[in-house]
Amino acid sequence: MPALLQPLHAEVLRRNPGEPEFHQALGEVLETLEPVLTARPELLEARLLERIVEPERQIIFRVPWQDDQGRIHVNRGMRVEFNSALGPYKGGLRFHPSVNLGIVKFLGFEQIFKNALTGLGIGGGKGGSDFDPRGRSDAEVMRFCQSFMTELHRHLGEHTDVPAGDIGVGGREIGYLFGQYRRITNRWEAGVLTGKGLGWGGSLARAEATGYGNVLFAAEMLKTRGADLAGQRVTVSGSGNVALYSIQKAQALGAHAVTASDSAGYVVDEKGIDLELLQQIKEVERGRVSDYAERRGPSARYVPGGSVWDVPTDVALPSATQNELDADAARTLVRNGVKAVSEGANMPTTPEAVRVLREAGVLFGPGKAANAGGVATSALEMQQNAGREAWSFSEVEDRLAFIMRDIHATVRDTAERYGAPGDYVLGANIAGFERVADAMNAQGLI
Ligand code: GLU
């Protein structure tokens, strides 16, 4: 940690005990900001960082619900409205048993900078619950979502706070949440949630956007070294929305995407992942990747409990969850000749792993930049809602591609301008920080 920022870092840790993921996300940003604060002392003087690290508002609430047997459960719901200098709070909801305030704060903090990088006028927020949707019936999930929204609705609005999906929250959950918001408020306010169904205000290509965007970002990084994604071997972790559409886009661009994983293990398929089969198992049957290996035949091998990063690859796309790629995994990837790592998930690479990759000269795309295509397309969904329009798939996809190229160029230029060419972490943090800090500075003491 640069000496300039040590006191602030220590103070934030002291005031936010027991939140290791937030501390990690914070540390990763603070470590890179010295050059901009030295070059622009007005930002230091205005204590912009001290303000940015403190959420504008944190909401924590009880979510009681009944299961199919009539038993009563109590979960905790949260929404951290981190920063609205650039637009309404924007960011997903995560339903997973691991969710706590520190996790929501790390996600919300990252979201501020990510959303700023999109250039689309969206602030940063995140929310969720420790509810575990796995193994729950549709009716149980609906009752949970209704109870969750009964409390959260008063904090939302198309100009105020606009949630979307994240881990455990997909089209089904967004549908239940939207229905309850509409009932309670008596407003048909399409722009209050994104990731909606296509027949009622959703955007084509939103489901695909995070994965597609990350693959495009990886391809842009490779181009800077004169390499093409076509023909490369690609490994993907996870088997949710981000992973599935990363595989699809990688294959469409001529790469060989050979893996997928879940919390129980991974599958490697030397013929390339059969996306239709994986989608059927994950999205329709809500099954596991082990089912894929069983049904796919001899080209696929399931490795229970193993690390997908043991599989040799040219391009690694961690698309599961935070801290899934540690220093050992990074060393294995380097040993196997990895050229690029691009984060589809939020903070999947540990700080030590990032260091290992950087020292080995591997291209590294941080999630704030690389996975911004999802939230950017949420902003496109909001634009369509505001104009009562529905754009074609190719219209949305073209805009997404333009945005990803723009983010890549901004991050690269910023890194160069601040004396760290090729450092995408520094470039993303500084570019995002400058946009938010300048807006806050112009808006008075907020
Ligand atoms: N949860 C996604 C992210 O981390 C999407 C957020 C959104 O669309 O609002 O960017």
Image: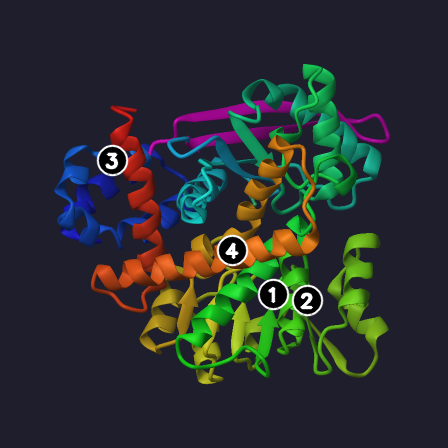
Q: Amino acid at mark 4?
A: Asn
Residue 281 appears in which quarter of the rendering?
Answer: bottom right
Look at the picture and state if 345 lies above or below 113: below
Label 4 lies in ligand 1 vicinity (Cβ under 8 Å): yes
Pointer 4 with pointer 3, Cβ within 8 A: no
Q: Amino acid at mark 1?
A: Ser
Identify the residue under disc 4: 371
Task: Look at the image and give the residue range highlighted in magenta.
Answer: 54-83
Secondary structure found at label 2: helix
Residue 254 appears in which quarter of the rendering?
Answer: bottom right
Q: Nearer the viewer, mark 1 or mark 4?
A: 4
Identify the residue under disc 3: 48
- Find the distance from the CA under tag 4 to the CA under tag 3: 25 Å
Instruction: Name the spot of residue 276 as percent of width and height, x first.
Output: 80, 66
Residue 237 — which label? 1
Report the front residue among 372 and 118: 118
Determine the quadrant in which ligand 1 lies. Answer: top right
Instruction: Name the spot of residue 236 as percent of width and height, x first.
Output: 60, 68
Q: Amino acid at mark 2?
A: Gln
Residue 248 — which label? 2
Q: Amino acid at mark 3?
A: Leu
Report the front residue among 128 and 265: 128
Along the horizontal axis of the image, is 73 left or right of 281?
A: left
Residue 145 appears anywhere in the view? no
Q: Is residue 38 magenta?
A: no
- Find the distance from the CA under tag 4 to the CA under tag 2: 15 Å
